[in-house]
Image (cartoon, helix red, strand yellow):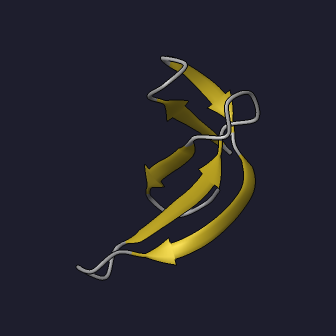
Amino acid sequence: MEGYCMKCKAKKEMKEVKAVTMKNGKPANEGKCPDCGTKIFKIGAAK
């Protein structure tokens, strides 16, 4: 799954991805940037 890293300012392939549910009940995915280790958060179900 690909997400945007705010620290690197580029789209990266997330590692350690896990599915989470936001407070409003919508699905999201949370992972880490492979280069800098910053948390990446992407709204929407995994495809």
> What's the residue at 54%, 61% (across, down)?
29
Quarter of the image with the C terminus is bottom right
Q: Judge from the rendering whether residue 34 lies leftward or rightward of residue 9; answer left or right.
A: right
- Residue at image location 59% in from the left, 71% down from the top: 19
Pick whichever, 8 or 47, lies toward us.
8
Rendering quarter of residue 17:
bottom right
Residue 44: percent from the left, percent from the top? 44, 59
**Apparent side of residue 24 relative to residue 28 in the rendered image (left or right):** left
Examine the rendered structure and indicate whether residue 24 appears above or below residue 10.
Answer: below
The residue that appears at 56% across and 37% down in the rendered structure is 3
Is 43 left or right of 32, judged from the image as shown? left
Look at the picture and state if 26 lies above or below 25: above
- Image point (67%, 40%), residue name: 37
Residue 18 image point, x, y percent? 66, 68
Pick out the residue farthest to the top: 9
Q: Residue 36: x, y in percent?
A: 67, 30
Q: Nearer the viewer, residue 9 or 3?
A: 9
Q: Does residue 41 appear left or right of residue 2 in this picture?
A: left
Quadrant occupied by the N terminus: top right
